[in-house]
Amino acid sequence: MMVREIDLRLRNDGMEIRQLASTLEYIGGLSNIPSKALFRLNLAIDELLTNTISYGYPDAREAEINVRLRHTGDRLEVRLADDGIPFDPLTLPDPDTTSDLDQRAVGGLGVHLVRTLMDGVTYERDHHQNIVTLTLLMPPSVNGGRPD
C-alpha cells in the first residue's frame, strides 16, 4: 500500500510534533520511504514546527497548523501552513559557523539545518497564512524494497 497524500491538522502544542513524527514513520513504512529520508524530513519538520509554536503565537491563543504530505514516488513534499505572525524563515542570513561558539550570535542554526537537509524550501504568505513547503528528492529504490 502506498500513501500518496495525507492532510493533518495539529494544535499549536509541542506534543503534537511527536505524534506527527510517529504518523510519518507509519506512512513511511507503508510507502517504502527510506528511513534516512524520513529522519531528514522529521528533523526539518520538528525544527519548523517548534519555531512556529514557540514564536508564531505570542498571544498564546489556540490555533491549528495544517500539514500536507504528498509522496509522488521520486519526491516528498510537505506543506506547513499556520496563521501565526508573518515570518519568512528564508530571509534569515546564513549563521556564522566559523567563529568560536561563545562569539556566535544566538539563533538561525535550525533554519540553516532545514535548508541543508531539504532539496527545496519555499515560503509564501497567503490569506494570512505562513506557508512553508519542503521538498525532498527520493533516491532510486533498491530492488523495490525500502532502502536506507
Image (spheres, helix red, strand yellow):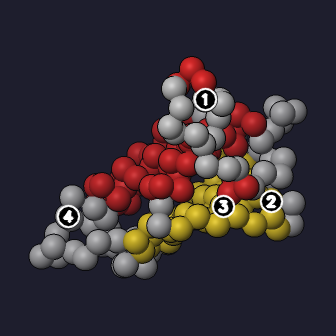
Q: Is residue 8 above or below residue 72?
A: above
> Which quadrant is home to the N terminus?
bottom left
Going 50% across and 47% down the picture, which residue do you hit?
113
> Which of the two discs, 4 and 1, labels the residue nearer the N terminus?
1
Question: Which mark sits nearer the N-terminus, 3 or 1?
Answer: 1
Q: Residue at x 52, y 25 (%)?
A: 101
Q: Gap between marks 2 and 1, in whole Å?
A: 32 Å
Helix, strand or loop status at disc 3: strand
Front: mark 4 or 1? 1
Which residue matches tag 3?
A: 132
- Local crowd at mark 1 within 10 Å, few (<14), some, or many (≥20)? few
Q: Is residue 120 left or right of residue 30?
A: right
Residue at label 1? Answer: 104
Answer whether labels 4 and 3 touch (C-beta < 8 Å).
no
Q: Tell me, yes or no, if residue 30 can be seen here.
A: no
Find residue 45 and report its horizontal and vertical position in percent: 53, 50
Q: Nearer the viewer, residue 107 or 81?
A: 107
Residue 94 x %, y %: 61, 49
Q: CA distance from mark 3 to mark 1?
A: 27 Å
The three-letter code of the residue at mark 1 reads: Arg
* Residue 5 percent across, percent down from the top left: 50, 72
Mark 2 or mark 1: which is in front? 1
Crowding at dot 3, Cα within 10 Å, few <14 / some 14-19 / many 20+, comes out as many
Q: Earlier in the sequence, mark 2 or mark 1?
A: 1
Q: Secondary structure at mark 4?
A: loop
Taking the spot 31% from the left edge, 64% from the top edge, the residue there is: 33
